[in-house]
Amino acid sequence: MSQNLLLLVLSSAVLIALFSVKRIPEGTVYTLRRFNGQARTLQPGTHLIWPLLERVVHRISLTGHVLPLDELFPLHSGSARLSGKIYWQVLDAARADALIDRADELIRARALNAARAVDNPAEETTEARNSRLKAALNDSLRDVGIVVTRVQIALA
């Protein structure tokens, strides 16, 4: 009986030791949360965690993300289709952690609001529209740790 108990304790200790080593790949940041709500961010590399107290909440990729955009856009003379892509990436994972699950929706909504800010968007050139949208998005997303690297949107 004591050998079985010893084997159980040793195997449990080995499992806990294996689960407490976390390898984070390059270009990725993990956010861990404890049961008491405390959070911490792990940069790429090998880290020790508390396997029963902490859990991985987000795996945030620091490499580029692509947001396809295909929306019906109202104009003074009817409507047109606003379509293209918005390229973005996370600069500060600690600030972006709170909204990373809904980052695409946030960027989409802010891009549409910025596109509506022009009185007659049909007269604006594509290059001017893209640079204006990129600047407006970066101004509004700077505080949340996200940067827009490129905007390729056409109004058709």
Image (tube, helix red, strand yellow):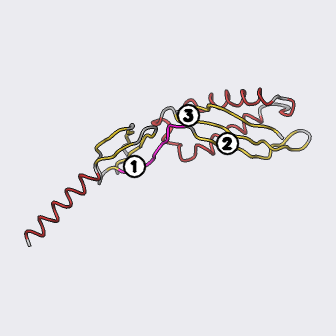
Number of marks drawn: 3
Magenta-colored segment: predominant secondary structure: strand
Label 2, secondary structure: give it. Answer: helix
Which secondary structure lies at badge 1?
strand
Res 108 label = 2
Query: Label 1 is placed on what type of residue?
Result: Val
- Eyeballing the image, is 142 above or below 83? above
Q: Which residue is mark 3?
A: 146
Q: Which residues are magenta?
A: 55-63
The quadrant holding residue 121 is top right
Residue at left 26%, top 53%? 18
> Mark 3 is on which residue type?
Ile
Cα–Cα gap, marks 3 and 2: 13 Å
Q: Position of residue 21 (x, y in %)?
A: 29, 47
Q: Residues within 10 Å of mark 2 (few under 14, many from 20)?
A: some
Q: Which residue is mark 1?
A: 56
User: What residue type is disc 2 on?
Assistant: Arg
State the SS at label 3: strand
